Amino acid sequence: MTHRISRRTGALTTTLGAAVLVGATALPAAAAPTAAVHCTSATAGLAEKLTKDITAALANRQGTVALGVYDRSTGTTCSLNSTTAFDSASTVKVTVLATLLWDAKKTNRYLTDTEADLTKAMITASDNDATSTLWKQLGVAKIQGFLTAAGMTKTVPGADGYWGLTQENVEDEQKLLKLITAKNTVLSDNSRAYMLKLMGQVIADQRWGTPAGAPSSVAVHVKNGWLQRSTHGWRVHSLGTFNGAGHDYMISVLTQDNSTMDYGVTTIQNVAKAVHKALVPTTPGVTRYTPTDSPREAFVAVPPRG
């Protein structure tokens, strides 16, 4: 059984099998049942704990949430709405960087000084002008080439230079994070190290989201994004990879239909805290990562309306 509070009516929605009820009144046929968190693990009891704790973290939260968790060290995965498409906002900047490095690898060249400056600004400060410059330099054909090589088959680059409207889902974002964090034939080891370095140097007011609750023994790499539009309200997303204390894991959380940016941030951080606590339990009093209480991101390249 799962529960959801409707933003429109404030009523509690309960999903029982395929039946969806609001009080005693059936929802319209177009309303989809609330999906359930699904976890598996090679470690006894961990999947059940994560399923329970993530579900509790999302209890009574409004909006649409998709998430993916993967921990190599325990053979653990979790998913929710993993194929639901979202406007990417600034999270696509990780894909832009990966495309640039993938393309450079094909000709066995280093990034130019200008490219290095642009990529640093794009990831660490979420600079939109830098992103637009690199997006134009690469072109959609090369970006699509990388997506194909990476197996990110459901990601669709934004049209007309509006990279913030790239369509992405958790399944593909988890594929990208797996490429960044383990040896593969798509990205070189040097490229992966460079990406993790930049994602580990994100400026303070953007270090929110999936790092929330990570223990001090774990290295944090993150890229976030948000976007407000007339449809689906605030999209708020966070991608993070974490390694240390015998663990190597990643978390992707994509959300939309949030009333404010801060509301979406809180939803993501509730999930992240549950995941970190379950995967890397620590003794009481051990310092855990506390994200900024003034989360910020940069407005992205999208049309003025929609």
Image (cartoon, rainbow, N blue to C red):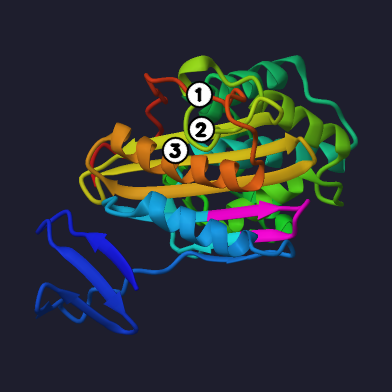
Q: Position of residue 83 (x, y in %)?
A: 50, 65
Main SS, magenta region, reads: strand
Place residue 198 in its image quadrant. top right
Q: Where is residue 157 in the image (x, y as percent from the top left)?
A: 52, 50
Q: How far separated are the C-alphas under marks 2 and 3?
A: 5 Å
Q: Which of 3 and 234 is in front in this view?
A: 3
| Outermost residue, bottom side | 18
Residue contact between numbered discs 2 and 1, judged by CB atoms under 8 Å? yes
The residue tagged 1 is: 290
| Outermost residue, front side | 284
Q: Is residue 180 above or below residue 155?
A: above
Quadrant in which the N terminus is drawn: bottom left
What is the crowding at mark 2: few (fewer than 14 residues within 10 Å), some, or many (at least 20)?
many
Determine the secondary structure under disc 3: helix
Of the two numbered discs 3 and 1 on the same chain, state the one appearing first in sequence.
3
Q: In this view, does 268 lie to the left or right of 258?
A: right
Q: What stretch is highlighted in magenta?
A: 68-77
